[in-house]
Amino acid sequence: MKTYLVTGGAGFIGSNYIHYMFKKYGDAIRIINVDALTYAGNPENLKEVEKRDNYTFIKADICDKAAIEKIFSENEIDRVVHFAAESHVDRSIKNPEVFVQTNVYGTAVMLNCAKAAWELPDGSFKEDKRFLHVSTDEVYGSLDDDGGYFYETTPYAPHSPYSASKAGSDMLVKAYMDTYHFPANITNCSNNYGPYQFPEKLIPLIINNALQGKKLPVYGDGKNVRDWLYVEDHAKAIDMVQEKGRLFETYNVGGHNEKQNIEIVKIIIETLRDMLPETDARRAHLTEELITYVEDRKGHDRRYAIAPDKIRAEIGWEPETMFKEGIRRTIEWYFANEDWMKNVTSGDYQKYYEEMYLK
Ligand code: NAD
Ligand code: DAU
């Protein structure tokens, strides 16, 4: 039985990945989830799995070397899937240091502890050990509206403190592979959407505001483009890269689903109107009049677009969920989990929202 050490598994993608893995492998794997439970980590995301005998949660910071060493010394870890990070661009613009700390230093701790646990006296590594570093397309910088794509060979050109810190972490993983032949892969994925996404990110923020009849903030001219991927497709890609990918390789993961932000906002309004019963009072205020153009994000990248040719050719992964279906499933999940939304938007979130949008 393989043992997985997942970092940041209480966040958006990490929790979806854990659900995906238990759905796929059931009792045939064991998962240890280490998460510091920052504002973005939520144990509620995992309440369906917390009673499983083959699931363990450990509350720890990935920068805490002693805590991470202890996990490796007490468990024979076969796979590391490293999600833990500070992940929100706007927060990185306001407060960059914690991004460097968690994303760069935390990754260094994870790499070093895995290396120490897996390295043999002759400098080679135990068989069938793999470390997967979950990264982002933002490390490649920004594309023009001219139809180009990010490839695995595109030079790094990050702009925000977030993407710079992720680029730094990718470089560390590359350095471990080049210097020590450390058994790792990197995936660089485009924008994810789906259940359990924290409402600081565009899609859940718009769903939540629209349902409450609040203004829908669109940065700048609303024509920035992102390439949206349903989160379960990302989880599947990660698993496939770990099981079928060539070691030491980078794989870009993307949805082939480019949309301008303003299109996303309009699709959400339309889908909500379509899904709410005629009798639901909230339908009355669900119009495009809620859309409000606000000050642009500093250094706002214009367009991201992934060409997932390599992962398709080598591994056979392809995005499966069409946006129309994915956004309906996402909205259905938010309908069914109103308490989840209430809980995550109480307390600190209100302060964040006021500072970000109401000042
Ligand atoms: P998230 O912010 O929802 O979750 C991050 C998780 O990491 C949280 O559970 C948080 O508690 C935990 N964490 C943060 N700092 C920690 C620390 N010091 N020690 C231990 N745990 C810590 O993020 P997400 O959107 O799920 O993203 C997960 C990963 O995927 C990140 O590495 C991100 O860069 C990458 N990624 C995200 C997207 C996206 O669209 N969201 C796309 C591509 C790549
Ligand atoms: O590309 C992958 C990246 O996608 C991940 O690495 C990041 O962790 C993830 O947060 C995401 O980054 P973005 O900055 O693209 O996502 P966000 O949801 O914050 O914003 C998406 C787009 O919507 C972006 O162009 C900014 C815009 N936006 C966002 C918010 C929150 C608005 O117009 N209004 C908003 O209120």
Image (cartoon, rainbow, N blue to C red):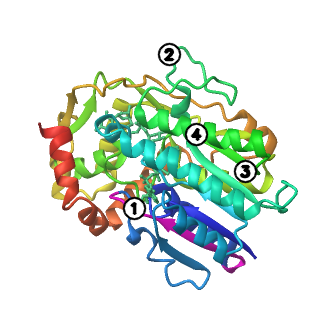
Q: Secondary structure at mark 2?
A: loop
State left or right for residue 272 relative to residue 143.
left
Instruction: Indicate which disc residue 255 carries.
Output: 4
Q: Is residue 79 magenta?
A: no
Amino acid found under the numbered disc labelled 3:
Val
Look at the picture and state if 168 lies above or below 40.
above
Earlier in the chain: of badge 2 and badge 4, it is 2
* Observer able to see residue 136: no
Instruction: Indicate which disc residue 144 carries.
Output: 2
Amino acid found under the numbered disc labelled 2:
Asp
* Label 1 within 8 A of ligand 1 by Cβ: yes
Q: How far across and how far down the image is residue 25, in percent?
A: 69, 72
Spot the residue most to the left. Answer: 359
For marks 3 and 1, give the one nearer the viewer: 1
Residue sitting nearer the eye, 28 or 94? 94
Q: Are marks 3 and 2 in contact (CB under 8 Å)?
A: no
Amino acid found under the numbered disc labelled 4:
Gly
* Observer able to see residue 65: yes
Instruction: Indicate which disc residue 262 carries.
Output: none
Earlier in the chain: of badge 4 and badge 1, it is 1
Q: In which quadrant of the rendered image does the C terminus lie? A: top left
Q: Quadrant of ligand 2?
A: top left
Spot the residue most to the right. Answer: 122
Residue sitting nearer the eye, 281 or 155? 155
Residue segment shown in magenta: 27-39
Amino acid found under the numbered disc labelled 1:
Gly
Q: Tell me the residue at 56%/65% (across/down).
A: 68
Earlier in the chain: of badge 3 and badge 1, it is 1
Residue pointed to by mark 1: 41
Residue pointed to by mark 3: 241
Q: Tell me the residue at 20%/62% (across/down).
A: 346
For marks 2 and 1, give the one nearer the viewer: 1
